Structures are given as structure tokens and as C-alpha cells.
Image (tube, rainbow, N blue to C red):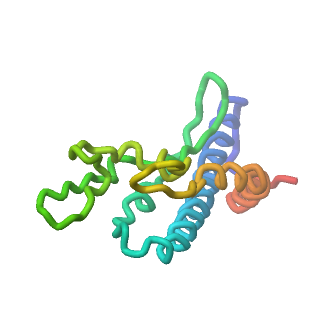
Amino acid sequence: MPIVRSKKELQVFLNDKLIKAMNKVGETALKHMVEYVDKKMQERVSDQSGLYDRTYEYLQSIEKINAKLDNLTGIVSVVIHYNTDKIHPYIIMDETGLWNKHADMDGNSVANLIPLFLEMGTENNPYYEHEPVGGIIDLKKWVEDNFRKELKTELNKIGIKTK
């Protein structure tokens, strides 16, 4: 630990270390969510019977925003989310009989709704019904069960001893 001459220097030092540790915890949480969603999607491959050819854009849209310190509240947070800019509509314009992907029957993009459809499921949908994936729900449970241990581990790795 460097020599600190004031309470402010100590606060800056500790906040920097906390942000670095939270980024590492966020990376672990991101990895967990991607693996969970991938597993759930792979379980569905055999259920699809060729009905839907996966783009994997849903899985690839899961990303982490680096940890930030809110100076007003003192809260350090990491955001894991679905970046719907990575999910694109595919409009089928010919007579192949294939469905639009990530678009409605009129060719309008529904890409921004894909995470909602997959997280919540599409019960009673006459065109494409499926059970929810629940990646966010699983991530919430993972955080509740593992956050303290993961943060302690990461703080210890960067020289902040915790009990």
C-alpha cells in the first residue's frame, strides 16, 4: 500500500481498488450468465426440429459495463445487460417459406424485444411458443449466493485484506 498523507488520498486509493475488484467480479458474473444462457439454449436445440435456425446474437449480446462509482451515493456498480444493438432483424423476402428472424410478419424489427421474449417466454403464442430462459433471474440468484465471496477474493488478490 502506498503512503497516504490524507483521508482523501486513502479514499481515492480504496475506491480505485474497489472499482478494479468489482470489474473482476463483474467479469465472473458475466461469464456465469453467458454459460447459463448458452446451456439453456443448447437444451432447446433438440426441441426445435428445424423450426428456427439460431443466429446466437441473443447469447452474443450479453455484455458488461465496467464498474463505476456514484460519487453521490458511494455505490460501486457493474451492469450486465443485453445489448440489443447486437441483435439484427433478418427479413426473408422470397417465397422460401422461411420466417423472418427477429422481425414481425410485416418485416418490422423486434430485435429490441428478443431479450424480453426469451427471458419471460412466449406462453400462448400461436406462432412460436417457448419456455423462458431466465438468464437475468439466474444471475440475480448467483449474485445473491456468490457476491460477497467473489468480492472478498478479488480484494484480497489486489492487496486489500478482508475477513
- At x 55% / y 39%, what residue is drawn? 68
Q: Residue furthest front?
A: 126
Farthest-out residue, top: 72
How far across and down, in percent of the image, does residue 147 sit? Answer: 74, 52
**In this rendering, is residue 6 above or below 98?**
above
Q: Position of residue 22 (x, y in %)?
A: 63, 49
Q: How many marks?
A: 0
Kindly indicate the quadrant of the structure image that contains residue 40: bottom right
- Foreground residue, 129 or 136? 129
Q: Residue furthest right?
A: 163
Q: Is residue 30 left or right of residue 55?
A: right
Determine the residue positioned at 61% across, 40% down.
77
Q: Nearer the viewer, residue 10 or 99?
A: 99
Q: State the residue in front, 61 or 18.
A: 61
Residue 113: give x, y in percent of width and height: 41, 43
Give the image location of residue 123, x and y in percent.
Answer: 54, 49
Residue 144 horizontal side relative to residue 119, left or right: right
Compared across the picture, whether 56 is left or right of 14 comes to: left
Which residue occupies the foreground of this view, 100 or 74?
Answer: 100
- Residue at screen point 64% across, 48% down: 17
Is residue 35 shown above or below 161? below
Q: Residue at x 48, y 55 (%)?
A: 129
Q: Quadrant of residue 94?
A: bottom left
Above or below residue 118? Residue 39 is below
Vertical side of 69 occupied by 54: above or below = below
